[in-house]
Image: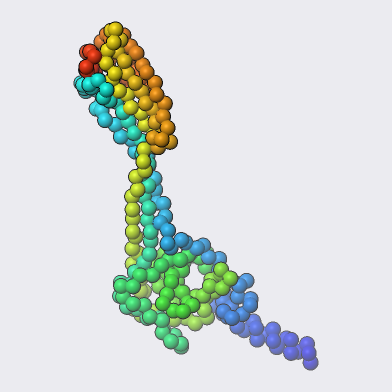
Amino acid sequence: MKAWKILVMTISLSGCIYAGEYNILPVGDVLASFSGHHIDYLDTKEERLLDSERLHETNFKSNKLLTAYKGYSVANTKSYVKNYYVQEAIIAPSDATMTSGVSPAEIKSGEKYEVIGRTFIDEKLYYIITSDLSSDIFLTDTDYTLQPYLGRIRNNKLIILDNKYRVSPEGYQFEPITKSRVLQSDMVSGFDIKYEGVQNNIMRFTLMHYDAGGSTGEFKTYSFENIPGLVEIAGVKIKVFNADDSRIEYMIIVD
């Protein structure tokens, strides 16, 4: 008789498992944590770095006749990093309801909802969406189409409730909204070549090479005989046409 009772209890327990589109256990069941779906949580409060690019800025035009006065730049360049950030959410474009045998779940037009995570069900990706309900969450596909199920989170796993809902209007979709921001860093690296005049028929230049966002640098002095021709400083080719102690006429040569 005792064995028979155990068998009946086993059959009753297995009957609580929904065998339709998803494998579902009752939320209150201790076995729910073993049957739930893994959640890949998203940070809803922090911006997400979408892309980065490195920018270079120069103060000279190549292959054009230029003039620089004593103490001023002949050529300089600066490098920056520009970061693109996004913060994503979704908004209800109109009212909607989800009804079943229990109280309907309502969605209010114009209300913003957060995408708190992602999950795979039967190898298909779904988004987990906040709701106005006390403990239930919405599900959408990757097009933000509302699914006819509610879920709950137990032990960091998604449990699908065994009530199937009717979504009205049918095929209801949330609209994604994205807040973006572009942040340009301080200078990452660069250099500045300055003309320091002529002394004893010698042209003088100084080079300041910046690193670590301009907080550190290397200073060098360059000297060349004061004759027309090509000189090179830090890989920059400078064709000198005329120079005296007050100014220099030159061209930056780019092959």
Q: Nearer the viewer, residue 73 or 37?
A: 73
Q: Is residue 238 above or below residue 94?
A: above
The reply, left or right, for residue 98 in relation to residue 110 is: right
Q: Quadrant of residue 248?
A: top left
Residue 94 percent across, percent down from the top left: 30, 75
Q: Quadrant of residue 18?
A: bottom right
The reply, left or right, for residue 58 in relation to residue 65 is: right
Q: Residue at x 49, y 82 (%)?
A: 163
Q: Quadrant of the N terminus?
A: bottom right
Q: Is residue 47 visible in this depiction of the protein? A: yes
Q: Residue at x 73, y 86 (%)?
A: 7
Residue 160 percent across, percent down from the top left: 52, 75
Display colour scheme? rainbow
Q: Residue furthest bottom?
A: 1
Q: Is residue 19 visible in this depiction of the protein? A: no
Q: Quadrant of residue 15?
A: bottom right
Residue 6 percent across, percent down from the top left: 74, 86
Q: Residue at x 23, y 22 (%)?
A: 68
Q: Quadrant of the C terminus?
A: top left
Q: Nearer the viewer, residue 88 or 187?
A: 187
